[in-house]
Image: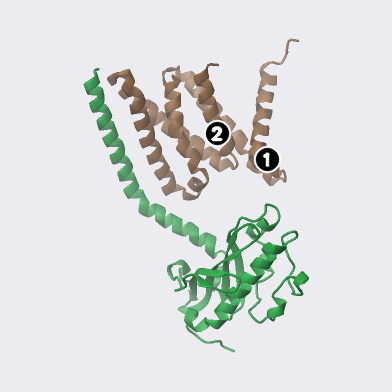
Amino acid sequence: MNRASSVVILLVLAGLGIGATYLVQQRSAPRIATEQRAIDSRNLLDLLPADSYDNQPLDQPLRLDNVVLSNSTLLGGYLATKAGQPAGVLLRSQTVGYAGSIELLVAIGANGKLLGVKTLRQSETQGLGARIADWPNAWLGGFTGKSRNEPADNGWALKQDQGQFDQIAGATITSRAVINAIHDALRYFDEHRQQLIGDSPHE
Amino acid sequence: MNRSSTLQHSLMLTPLIGATDSWLTALGVWVMFIVVISAYGVGMAVLRPKLVPNARLIAGILLAATLTSCAEMAAQVWALQWHQHAGIFAGLIALQCVVLDHTGFFQSAWRERLRLCGLFGALMLALGLREFIGYSGLHLATLVPGGFILLGLLIAAWQAWARPNPSH
């Protein structure tokens, strides 16, 4: 036991440690990435009815890049298909709430009706606006089946703004932001249906 | 209780409060703790006699960092969701190795080591039960203050049980 042999042992130990960590990292990185993808799709896709699509929507991103709408920004989107036919789109929408930005995932069916809305990120007031992050969410569920023109433009607002939707108690600004973002997304889908899913309305 | 055992105990307090908001998280952190601590103990038992005293701390840090990194990546492969919830506490195990080494844990008797690991596990799992208390409607139980309160109650119960006849 002397200084020199200790230094050699330390160097060997450091080399082995770095080597082992590197090898484990190399071997596990692809599996971790796959697993992360599976978690992402579970988190993102649970607002689509399970039998409404049969592709991997996350592998079919739409060409949307920060499309600025009147009350929100579309950050991106995904296409869901069933038996090769477009079943709907998922739009990631960002808007500004009471305390900061809110990121929503808005699922719209090929018929232009809303399939569901889910909050991906928010920093609203705990216990009030932050309730938009609860999942499943009865308030957000209330929008399912609505479309751009149903209700009409003036109906797409809170009851206190002469619209037809209830608000989350104590969170007027958050509720207003979410409603406007959803309406924005529906309007965008309506106006860009051809570009998004490549067919025209069936009506 | 000397200063280094206070350090050792306060390091254990972090996962005890932070990683016990769900039972599975608590169990996972404890299992990882046992695996990494055991591997570290074996590794250092081999290295220690071959090193001058000054080099032991560096060797310990290298070994603890390697073992914890590898264990963390293995945890990510097997249970990524668990790791996303508990990863930061899993990382602390490296520090616990070094501190336990420093306080002479690996030189103490087998029974003593088993007792500490067992006590840590029992407390982790007991505090992990907060998750189920939370389900029954007491939301406070799942928050950090709830962890402190339950830990305080457990220690009080232990004290009362260990000293049934307090002298006045």
Name the disc covering residue B141, or none.
Answer: 1
The kind of secondary structure element at disc 2 is helix
Residue drawn at (42%, 27%), measured in percent from left and top?
A: B98
Residue drawn at (24%, 20%), measured in percent from left and top?
A: A3
Tell which residue pokes out farthest to the top in this image: B167
The reply to whether residue A138 is visible in this rendering is no
B10 lies above or below A27: above
Q: Tell me the quarter of the picture where residue A122 sits.
A: bottom right
Q: Chain of mark 1?
A: B
Residue drawn at (52%, 60%), measured in percent from left and top?
A: A42
| Residue type, mark 2 in image | Thr
Is residue B116 rendered to the left or right of residue B66? Answer: right
Quadrant of the rendering where the N terminus of chain A is positioned: top left
Tell which residue pokes out farthest to the bottom in this image: A203
Q: Position of residue B131 (x, y in %)?
A: 63, 42
Q: Colour of chain A?
A: green
Q: Position of residue B110 (x, y in %)?
A: 45, 19
Mark 1 Cα within 10 Å, few/some/many (few <14, many 20+)?
Answer: many
Circles 2 and 1 on the same subunit: yes
Residue drawn at (67%, 54%), measured in percent from left and top?
A: A125
Q: Colour of chain B?
A: brown
Q: Which residue is mark 2?
A: B14
